[in-house]
Amino acid sequence: MSMTFSTFTFYAFSAILIFAALRVITTRNPVHAALWLVLSFFSAAGIWLMLQAEFLAIALVLVYVGAVMVLFLFVVMMLDVNFEVLRQHFRSYLPIAAAVGALVLFEMALVIVDSAIGHTATAGAPPPAGGNTSALGKLLYVEYVYPFEIAAVVLLVAIVAAIALTQRDPRHRKHQDPSWQVKVRREDRLRILDMPSEKPPA
Amino acid sequence: MNDLLAPVQHAFGPWWDPLWTLVKIVVIAVPLILAVAYLTYAERKVIGWMQVRLGPNRVGPLGLLQPFADVLKMLFKEIIVPSGANRALFFTAPLLSLAPALAAWAVIPFTDTLVLSNINAGLLYILAMSSIGVYGVILAGWASNSKYAFLGCLRSAAQIVSYEIAMGFALVGVLMAANSLNLGDIVAGQEGGAAYWYIWPLLPLAVVYLVSGIAETNRHPFDMAEGESEIVAGFHVEYSGITFAIFFLAEYMNMILIATLTSIMFLGGWLSPFPILNDVDVFGARPFGDGFLWLALKVAFVLLIFLWIRATFPRYRYDQIMRLGWKVFIPVTLVWIVFVGAMMQTNYADLFH
C-alpha cells in the first residue's frame, strides 16, 4: 500500500530534480539559474529523506539552501552578468568540457556497474538503529574525531586568511570622535582671506 | 475512532495515508490562520492600551470582527505589478515566505501525543525551515524592480542570515541539555515543574533565542527590512492587496512559531508549572494538568512579550543590529555552550539536564 505511494514520490522527486538541474544550465537569467539550483537541492534532499538519511537531507537544506545559495543570490543579484560575453568562448572551451563530462560519466558508470555486481553497500542498506543523526554523530565525534577536528581547523585557517586579506587598516575607517568634535575652535574651521576687491572687466 | 474510520480507509485504498495526513494538516493550519487573525487584533489592542487608546472597536462587538474586515479589504484590492517586474517571481515570493512558516508546524508537538510528524531530527528540521524563509524576502525585493524594495531585501537578508547563527547555537544548548533532537523528548526532559524548565540552566541562551527570534521575524525593534523612515516599507513596498496580506500572514505565523518553540524548548511546552495541578480533579477530568492549555498560555505570554517590546523600544540602527548579532550574541552563546558542556562533566551535571 505505502509502497506504491513512495514509488510515486521517488519518481516525482527525481523528475523534478532532473528538470531543475537541466534548467540551471539552460536558463538565460542568472537569478533564475540560482533558483533552479535551489529547487534541485531541495529535490535531492527529498530523495535522501526517502532513503532515511534524514540528517544529510536536512543538512543539505540547512547549509546549501539556507546559507550558501542565499549568499550566491546576493552576489548574482548585485552583479550585472553579461551572458553574451560569457558565451563567446563556448566553442573554444567545448573540447575540454566534453572530455571532463565523458570522464564524469565514465566514473558514474563504474560505480553503478560495481554496485550492480554487488561489491559495495548500496543505498538500500537498512538505517542504523537509533536514527541516522546519532549514528553519524558517534562516527564523527568518536571514531573519526581527529580527522574531523583537523578539517575544522583547516576551515578556521581559511576564515582567518580571508579576513586577514580583506581587513583594512583602522585609519581607512570613517568614524567620528565626539571629544575631538567638541574641542574644535573657530580657527580650525574658518579661514578669512583678505583679498583686494577688483573691478569686473568691462 | 479507528473503527469508525475503517470503512472510509478501505474505500480510499493506497491513497488513504496521504489523504489522512492532508486532513491532519488542515486541522493544524486552519486554527493557526485564525490565531494569526486574532494576533493582529491583539497586537493593536495591547499596543492601544499601552498608549492609552482604545484600539480597534468599531467592527463587531469590541472590534472583534476587525481582522475579517481587514482580510476582506485586502482580498478586494487591486494587485498592481510594477513595470519591469519579474512577474513569475513577483508572485512566487509571497508563497515562498509563507510555505516554510507553515511547513515548520509539521513537527511541533501540541501535547505528548498530538503531533503531525514525530521525527527524531525535529530540531534540525525547524532550523532548516526557518533558514529558507529568507528566500521570500530576497525574491520579493529583487523581483519588484524597485530600489527601495531591493535595499530592504538586502538589509533584511543580511540580518536574517546573521541572527540565524546565534539562533542555531542557542538550539545546540537545548539539545545538549535534552540529549535529543526530538521536540517531544525535549519537553519530556523538563518534567517536574517550573524549576526543571531549561530556561534556568540555559537562561542566556533563552534570552538570545527570543531576541534572535524577534530579529528573524523582522519585528520591531529589528524591522530594518521595513524601516519606514528610510526605505518606505522595505522589501514589500510594491506589493498590494492579497499578495501583501500573505507577507503579513507569514510574518505573524513566524511570530507564533518562534513563541511556540520558545515555550517548548525553554518553558516546558505542554507541562504545567506545578505538578500538583495534575491531581486537581474537576468532575472526573483534569483540566489544569499537563496539556494543550499550558502550551497555549505560554505561547500567549511570549507573544505578549513580542508586542510589549514593539511598544517599548525604538528601532535599532543597522550597524547596531549587526554588532549585537555578531559581537554580542554569538560570543555569549559560544561561551555558554562551553560552560554547559564543562559543567556536565562535574557533580552539578544534574542541574543541566
Image (cartoon, coloured by chain):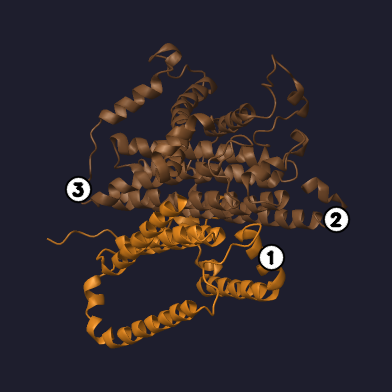
Chain colours: A orange, B brown
Could you tell me if residue A123 is visible in this image? Answer: yes
With A198 as the anchor, is B215 left or right in this view? Answer: right
- Front of the two marks 3 and 2: 2
What secondary structure is found at the residue carrying circle 1? helix
To which chain does the residue with label 3 belong? Answer: B
Which sits in the foreground, B25 or A189? B25
Q: CA distance from mark 3 to mark 2?
A: 65 Å
Q: How many angstroms separate mark 2 from mark 1 (CA)? A: 22 Å
Q: Looking at the image, is A18 positioned above or below residue B349?
A: below
Q: How packed is label 3: few (under 14 Cα within 10 Å), some, or many (20 or more)? A: few
Question: Circle 3 sits on which residue?
Answer: B83
Q: What kind of residue is marked 3?
A: Ser
Name the residue nearer the viewer: A22 or B231. Answer: A22
* B185 sits to left or right of A51: right
* Comparing labels 2 and 1, the label whose residue is closer to the camera: 1
Across and down, in percent, residue A132 comes to 60, 60
Q: Position of residue B247 (x, y in %)?
A: 38, 40
To which chain does the residue with label 1 belong?
A
Report the side of B30 relative to B321 (left or right). Answer: left
Residues tagged 2 and 1 counted as in contact (Cβ below 8 A) = no
The answer to whether B206 is drawn above or below residue B345 in the figure is above
> Height in image: B164 above or below B253?
below
Q: Quadrant of residue A102?
A: bottom left
Identify the residue shown where x is 50% and y is 54%.
B161
Label 3 vs label 1: CA separation? 55 Å
Residue farthest toward the top in the current orientation of the protein: B61
Sequence-earlier tag: 3 or 2: 3
Residue contact between numbered discs 3 and 1, judged by CB atoms under 8 Å: no
Q: Which mark is residue B346?
A: 2
